[in-house]
């Protein structure tokens, strides 16, 4: 018996698969463009303008990026004797400052594992400021479920330095809880049970930036996650933003490549500046027109084979919820508890304040120094 999408009783996955089906051509176009080095040509003029405008703005407040090498065919090239010694071999500059790695380590400090008290279910979440974490709705769908989980920071392996001790935080939905099923997003308060051991606000936090233009199609992305509920991991290879669009019924989502596993739900998806551009929520399998889930050989996979060898299932892409859309939804959310509204307003204000992204990362420096 073949494995059919409609028999999985997973409405969230069905909706995501249907969203992706009509966009497979766009994703494949971007994949081909990445190989050819022409990915910028696949994005819309509107989004490219937003991206270029934001890059120009950031260049004024940050150290300038390494300037692009001029073409060897330009008239002002005077010394052709150096031809073939050094070059930017692609169509855009991939050089990054070495602090890219340091920023990534600080960005990772605020990402933690969400675990059920009985150890049955896992997810990933990350601090977003003021003692709040963000994850998926399907990880923490309601206040009752939230109370059955805890949040653990510092669950990491370190074989060449000091082992990172972990920090356990309980989840307190009474202080704050917001969940949006359509977006598959949840924000909930956590409690610092042991403030004497590196206070929670020393782990840093991530501001959700409403402004568009943080990334363009074909750009690399990085995902910090707890796959299978294990120690923290990061995927930085073979990951690119494949598709994103405005003004359609799927404008809330984006699609990208990159390895994830069960337990990675709720992971932050970063651009090269370590800004959150999306929240990961699922990997979408490839299907045919009959709704059969396909194996990596292109043929429908049987239910038995999928159970024994899940690695044989073919996946079309990952889907994430766009940061700008999360901010929009949170801003218009209605709360029955006045203090929840106050916390929401304070959170939105802190995200939109100048320098919020860098302040959140710099806060993580204190926890790193304490270790």
Image (cartoon, rainbow, N blue to C red):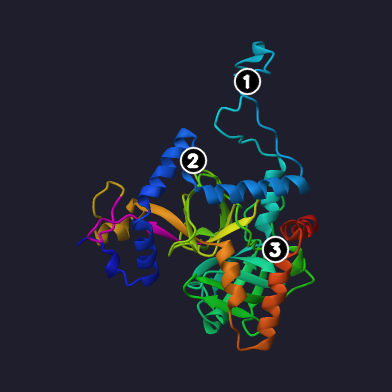
Q: Which residue is mark 1?
A: 74
> Which residue is painted at 75% across and 67% down in the image?
201
Q: Is residue 42 above or below residue 170?
A: above
Asked which secondary structure carries label 1, the reply is loop
Name the side, left or right, on which 154 lies relative to 116.
right
The residue stretch that appears in magenta: 280-295
Q: Is residue 340 visible?
A: yes
Q: Is residue 110 above or below residue 56?
A: below
Camera-side residue of 176 and 160: 176
Disc with the residue nearer the chain's start (1 vs 2): 2
Which x, y percent locates residue 98?
71, 40
As drawn, the residue found furthest toward the top would be: 81
Q: Which residue is mark 3?
A: 205
Task: Tell me the tag on residue 272.
Answer: none
Q: Residues within 10 Å of mark 2 (few under 14, many from 20)?
A: few
Q: Closer to us: mark 1 or mark 3?
A: 1
Task: Tell me the tag on residue 41.
Answer: 2
């Amino acid at each position: 018996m073949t494995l059919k999408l409609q028999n999985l009783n997973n409405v969230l996955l069905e909706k995501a698969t249907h969203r992706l089906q009509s966009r497979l051509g766009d994703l494949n176009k971007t994949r081909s463009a990445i190989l050819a080095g022409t990915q910028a040509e696949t994005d819309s003029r509107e989004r490219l303008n937003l991206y270029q405008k934001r890059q120009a703005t950031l260049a004024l407040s940050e150290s300038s990026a390494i300037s692009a090498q001029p073409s060897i065919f330009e008239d002002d090239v005077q010394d052709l004797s150096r031809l073939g010694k050094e070059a930017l071999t692609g169509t855009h500059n991939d050089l990054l400052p070495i602090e890219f790695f340091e920023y990534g380590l600080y960005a990772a400090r605020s990402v933690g594992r969400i675990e059920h008290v009985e150890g049955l279910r896992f997810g990933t979440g990350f601090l977003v400021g003021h003692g709040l974490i963000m994850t998926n709705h399907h990880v923490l769908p309601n206040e009752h479920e939230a109370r059955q989980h805890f949040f653990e920071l510092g669950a990491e392996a370190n074989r060449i330095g000091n082992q990172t001790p972990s920090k356990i935080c309980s989840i307190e939905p009474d202080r704050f809880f917001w969940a949006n099923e359509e977006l598959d997003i949840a924000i909930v308060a956590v409690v610092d049970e042991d403030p004497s051991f590196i206070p929670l606000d020393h782990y840093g936090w991530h501001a959700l930036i409403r402004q568009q233009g943080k990334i363009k199609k074909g750009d690399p992305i990085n995902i910090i996650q707890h796959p299978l509920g294990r120690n923290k991991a990061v995927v930085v290879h073979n990951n690119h933003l494949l598709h994103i669009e405005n003004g359609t019924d799927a404008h809330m989502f984006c699609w990208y490549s990159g390895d994830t596993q069960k337990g990675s739900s709720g992971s932050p998806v970063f651009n090269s500046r370590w800004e959150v551009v999306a929240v990961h929520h699922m990997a979408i399998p490839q299907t045919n027109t009959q709704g059969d889930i396909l194996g990596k050989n292109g043929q429908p996979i049987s239910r038995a084979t999928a159970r024994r060898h899940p690695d044989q299932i073919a996946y079309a892409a990952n889907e994430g919820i766009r940061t700008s859309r999360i901010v929009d939804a949170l801003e218009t959310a209605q709360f029955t508890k006045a203090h929840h509204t106050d916390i929401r307003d304070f959170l939105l204000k802190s995200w939109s304040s100048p320098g919020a992204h860098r302040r959140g990362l710099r806060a993580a420096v204190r926890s790193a120094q304490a270790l």
